[in-house]
Image (spheres, helix red, strand yellow):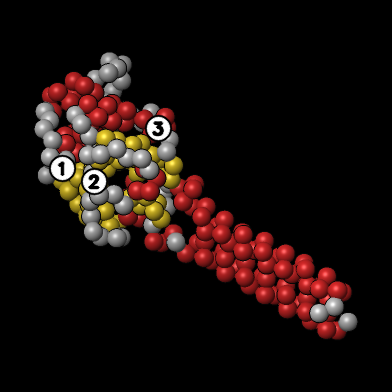
Amino acid sequence: MNLDKKRKMTPIRTLQLQAILLAMLLFNAPYVEGAGESPTRAFSTNNNSDQLCGPLAVLKVLQECGREGELISIVQDCETNSAQVGASMLDLSDCLQKRGVSTASIWIGSDMRIEWRHPVILHLHESSENGGHYVVQLPCEERNHARVWFGPGREALISNAELATRRSGAVLLTAPHPIPHPTKAVTQIDSALWKPWVWAAVSLVVIAVHKYFRLFSQSEE
């Protein structure tokens, strides 16, 4: 290959490299943006509809972890601010930590699902008539569904996509041990996985078309 021809091919190689890097960025972007540690944001979420919803969620987590807990004591611990109606996520976290359960707060997007071997407290948009603001997501083997405890005697298996639309984004992970990397507990919902691959495919098509016309124009010269 002579120098002139090599110089003509350089822009194509540069474009290919840029497209590959773009595809890599697009593939990783949803995870970076969809989940992140944000204690301040998550902890500021309050439950304004049902004052017992939060304490009941704490009690359920304790039961699942094999630890003792009394609802009255939990309610008293959650009453940290007399002007506040209901418990905040921070109150729930403090109650659990006080009783030997580790917690970690994260904020996740609507394109994410939770994969965690321990109970998770979720904050929902909806009112208490529809299950309350705080619910507990329990471990589940179903990849596309989540096992959710909405309150005493109310447990259901719902799709990850449906649950994602009902979540506010505030999530409290729990575990019997410290949680060093909380963002590893979340991943993309399967229906959202195609998006980065589409962008990558489009990038490759653009490269192929550009290369074809570039080589065609060179052959005519």
Residue 162 shows in this picture: no
The x, y position of residue 17, in whole percent, is 67, 64
Q: Is residue 188 left or right of residue 119?
A: right
Vertically, is 202 above or below 179? below
Residue drawn where x is 24% and y is 23% of the image: 78
Q: Residue at x 77, y 68 (%)?
A: 10
Disc 2 crowd rating (10 Å Cα; few below 14, some 14-19, many 20+) is: some
Q: Which residue is mark 2?
A: 118
Instruction: Please determine whether, in this image, residue 76 is positioned above or below residue 56.
Output: above
Q: Confirm or deny contact between disc 1 and disc 2 (CB under 8 A).
A: yes
Where does residue 100 sit, x and y in percent of width and height? 20, 31
The amino acid type, in three-letter code, at marker 2 is His
Amino acid under disc 3:
Pro
Q: Which residue, given by chain and number where applicable, does mark 1 sit on?
A: 64
Q: Using the rendered view, name the quadrant where residue 192 is placed.
A: bottom left
Mark 2 falls on what kind of element?
A: loop
Q: 143 or 164: which is nearer to us?
A: 143
Lower position in the chain sequence, tag 1 or tag 3: 3
Question: Residue flagged by tag 1: what amino acid is it?
Answer: Glu
